[in-house]
Structures are given as structure tokens and as C-alpha cells.
Image (tube, rainbow, N blue to C red):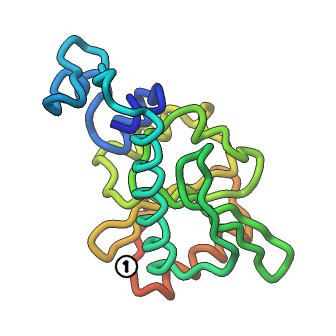
Amino acid sequence: MESAAFSSRPIGWLFRAIYGIDFKELIHSVRIDGVLDGSIGELILNPAIDLRELRAVIHEMKDSSARYMRRVLSPHGQYSYSRVARCGIVYTVFGEGGRELIMLYPWIVPSRRALNYHSREDRVIVIMHRPSEEFADLMDMHTDELPPRTGFVFISNNEALVYRPQYLNNAFDSFLDFLYRSNLRVSYLN
């Protein structure tokens, strides 16, 4: 629904890494009577639907869920919602001058817009979903397509699955401290 509402084109390999299915395969099975149809291989949104209202509802749902994620993780920093990246944002400053952008996604349409949002900063993308079994392998195959300062954390069933960024720094280590203090069981994907 989000992809259709915002005309987002997911990055195929990253969508597969996160959700375990190709986006193009998924489209064919999508059908919400009177709202959305993907049976022809393209998402067609009912033209009678008010697009601004639909987008507002998606933003509201993601903001509310991201606020919940923030309470679970309890990172220091100011929370805001980004309509550009369509996620909750916590900009955190750590003791030794390290800074990190924490992007809270209840769900994600992994697009260029998401990957390019402040891509030169140290950041972590947190997703409330368990990644596919092939996540680490696909990420390793596409390393050159990822911003080197971006890590991923997946939260599911009181567990945090961590994929460390290519460029490790103190800020990411400090973020891991939040995970350990949040009563989540922490495992590493790489």
C-alpha cells in the first residue's frame, strides 16, 4: 500500500533480503478489493481514493509505531518523524562527540530515498521485522550499493538482530549499549 501511495520503487535485492520475497513476485498476489490491485504486475490504486488522506494515514501509523519502538529502545535524543524518509528519527549524541541517526521503521519500503537519507552520517536503520534467512548473504553481495556508515537492526520477539555497518565507529558501539540495556536478546548477523 505504501509503495503505491508514494510511488516508491523498492530496491529488489534489499526487499528480498528483508522480507524473503521479490517485490515483483509479491505484487502479483496483492489485491485489496476496491482499494489496490497488483494482478497485472503493477500496483494500481483505486483512483477514487484520496491520495493525500491515504498518505496521512500511513504517516500517522508509522509515526505512532516508531514512537513505540523508541520507548522499547530508549535511546537518548530528540524524536521527530520524517515525512521524507517515512520513519521516526532519533538523532543521538554520545559522550565522546560521536553522533548517530537512528531511523525507526515499523516496516520499510527499502528504496533509494531511504538509503540516501543522510547517508554520509553514522546511522542505524531499525526495522520491526525479522529479516529473511538470506539477509547477510545478500547484504554481503551488494556491499558496494550500501552507505558504509549504515547498520541495520531487526527487532522481533524480544530479540535484536544486528547487521554492523562496514565502517564501525564508537557511535554504533554506543547504540549497541542501548540494545543491551533494553532487555532485548542481541544477536549478530555479520
Number of residue marks? 1
User: Which residue is nearer to you in this view: 108 or 55?
Assistant: 55
- In the displayed structure image, the side of residue 75 where residue 48 appears, left or right: left
User: Which residue is nearer to you in this view: 135 or 81?
Assistant: 81
- In the displayed structure image, the side of residue 88 where residue 32 appears, left or right: left
Query: Looking at the image, which residue is at 31% across and 66% down?
Result: 156
In which quadrant of the rendered view does residue 184 lie? bottom left
List x then y, in percent, for residue 108: 43, 46
| Label 1: few (<14), some (14–19) or many (≥20) C-alpha neighbours in 10 Å | some
Whether 61 is drawn above or below 3: the answer is: below
Per the image, the residue denoted by label 1 is 185
- In the displayed structure image, the side of residue 37 where residue 77 appears, left or right: right
List x then y, in percent, for residue 145: 60, 31
List x then y, in percent, for residue 160: 40, 69
Query: Looking at the image, which residue is at 42% across and 74% down?
Result: 186
Query: Looking at the image, which residue is at 64% across and 50% down?
Result: 166
Q: Specify the farthest residue to the top.
A: 40
Query: Looking at the image, which residue is at 51% across and 74% down?
Result: 70
Q: Amino acid at mark 1?
A: Arg
List x then y, in percent, for residue 34: 17, 28
- In the displayed structure image, the side of residue 36 where residue 86 appears, left or right: right
Whether 51 is drawn above or below 104: the answer is: above
Describe the element under mark 1 as helix, strand or loop. Answer: strand
Q: Quadrant of the N terminus?
A: top left
User: Which residue is nearer to you in this view: 55 or 98?
Assistant: 55
